[in-house]
Each structure stands twice: as C-alpha cells, then as structure tokens.
Image (spheres, rainbow, N blue to C red):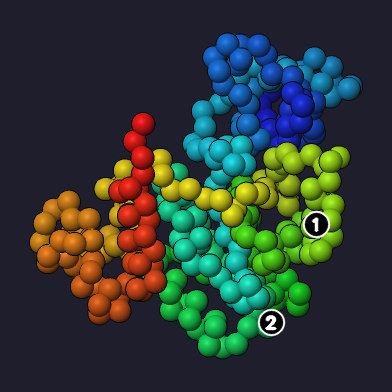
Amino acid sequence: MEGKIIKGIAGFYYVYVVESGLYECKAKGIFRKEKMKPLVGDLVSMAVLDEEKKEGNIERILPRKNELVRPAVANIDQALVVFAVTDPKPHFHLLDRFLVMMERKGIPAVLCFNKKDIATQKEMAHLKEVYSGCGYPLLLSSALTQENIEPVKELLRGKTTAIAGPSGVGKSSLINLLQSEVRMETGSISKKIARGRHTTRHSELIKIEEGSYIIDTPGFGSLYVDDFEKEELKHFFREFADFEEHCRYSGCDHVHEPGCAVKAAVEEGMIHRSRYENYLGMYQELKEKKRY
C-alpha cells in the first residue's frame, strides 16, 4: 500500500492513504542502516500491521523529487512566499535570498504580498515594478478583508506548497483562511506561547482538500546562501537569462566584465536595480566565504 507522510513525531510517522485514511507507522531499521530518514511529504510503501487500529510499517521510501532541510520536508511542488506590502515594509534582500534557494532546488515560487488593505497605490506599484519582470506569479492579498484569497487557493489546488515568510506579515492569518483543519496562532499570542516549553515544533502537511497540502516553513529569518559557488548564482536570477547570451564573454558573471548585457539591461531599466544589487551582495558573500 502506498501513501504520503503528513506528520512525523517522536519516531512515529502518520501516513495518509487515499480512500483508506491515516495510518500510524514506524520506519523499518533498514533506513537507519542506510542513513536515510523518512521525511514529511515522502511518498512511501507501507505494510499494514493492524487495519482496525490503522497501524503499519514503512518499508520503502519512493524516489524524492526534492527536499528541504528547514523544515525537513520532501516533494514540495511550489513555495508561496508571503511578505507584507507594508507594516513591516518588505525586506527585498531576504526575499531574493529565498528565491535563490528555491531556484537552486528547482521549486517554483509564487509571491504573495499581504496587507493590501492598508497599503498605498504607490507601495503596491513599487512591488510590481521590482518583481513583475522576474517570472514569478505575483498576488496582492488581504487576510483581514479576505481579498484575493480565492486566487491564492486556486494556485494551491492539487499541489503540496511550502508557505514561507517573516513574522508580522499575516502568514498565520492567511494559513487559517486557506484551510480549516489546523488553527495557527496569530499576532501577540504566538509571541507568548509558541515558544513555551511544552510546544513541539514539527513539520506537518495540512490538507486543504484532496491532493492539496500546505506546510508552514519556520526559520525564515536565517537564510544562508553559501553552499554553492559564486559562478552558479547568476543561474538563479531568472530575468538574467534573456540577456546573458548577448554578453561579450561567455561565462560572464555580470559583475566587472566589459560588454555585459545584463549590466546594460540594468542601466536601461529592463532588470530592476534592486534585484541586481542583491545579486552583487550575494555574489560577494559567496566570493568571501571561508573554505575548509
């Protein structure tokens, strides 16, 4: 029998099987020997030990198409990146770091800017100016007034989506609107109780409807882009691709080289300067990283 791990706690894995329900499973010792740990999101083959009690053993992990380290989750179809249009103002450098991480993993990203109900037309226009040319779907929503929640739900349909974003942007309110199974703590409540000593943070897929899942992605404030070479970075900025074939030198890194078509595109406003400057910042970080 095959199913999908939707939650893992203290060595138990909860495997959802379409039309059969949820099974509590242990993983066979062979995984420890092979140094492979089942992850939330894994598609697995399992043996049913007790149908009445819904207990089983995970026997095999089916091939993964991707995996994230934080949270530990596999087989993500896309990432929904949530920032606020304002209050707090979006941190473009943090957003671009996340987009680089997703590009590197081959995970498509969707940009959702929340709190449009308190934003000015100028603030919304600026976001569109910076990100509309990057090749990512972009939505402006309001969890408070529930504006544009349906288009968000439509983008999630039939997919497993990691939802990521810094604190204070209305991410928990948005998750609560997207599904009814799990209530996320919002606002000041979370500051008081989410880090209590009895609170366990574990990865969990939350079912929206059959075949549609979301997972909250904690730890958004500490994204390190340092596990690849600086020469690879340019491949993770989508909008560079249209111009780099016109660079004078093949292998151009779009930093100091003469005849660089990407730099020319920045000057002409065809690539937004904010994105390019964040590229240079990350390039410099990768250049200076210590080698051990």
Q: Is residue 74 visible?
A: yes
Foreground of the two, 98 or 291: 291
Mark with earlier residue (1, 2): 2
Q: Amino acid at mark 1?
A: Ser
Whether residue 194 sits left or right of residue 223 in the image: it is: right
Q: Return the residue nearer the eye: 127 or 53.
A: 127
User: Where in the figure is residue 1, as x and y percent of width and height?
Assistant: 68, 23
Is residue 251 left or right of 199 when viewed as pictured? left
**Residue 113 image-quadrant placement:** bottom right
Q: Is residue 75 visible?
A: no
Q: Which residue is mark 2?
A: 117
Q: Nearer the viewer, mark 1 or mark 2?
A: 1
Q: Is residue 150 above or below residue 159?
A: below
Q: Residue at (74%, 23%) from the top-left corner?
A: 11
Q: Residue at x 53, y 67 (%)?
A: 91
Point out residue 168 in the picture as x, y percentages from the top left corner.
69, 66
Residue holding disc 1: 190
Label 1 crowd bin: few (<14), some (14–19), many (20+), radius 10 Å: few
Figure quadrant of residue 46: top right
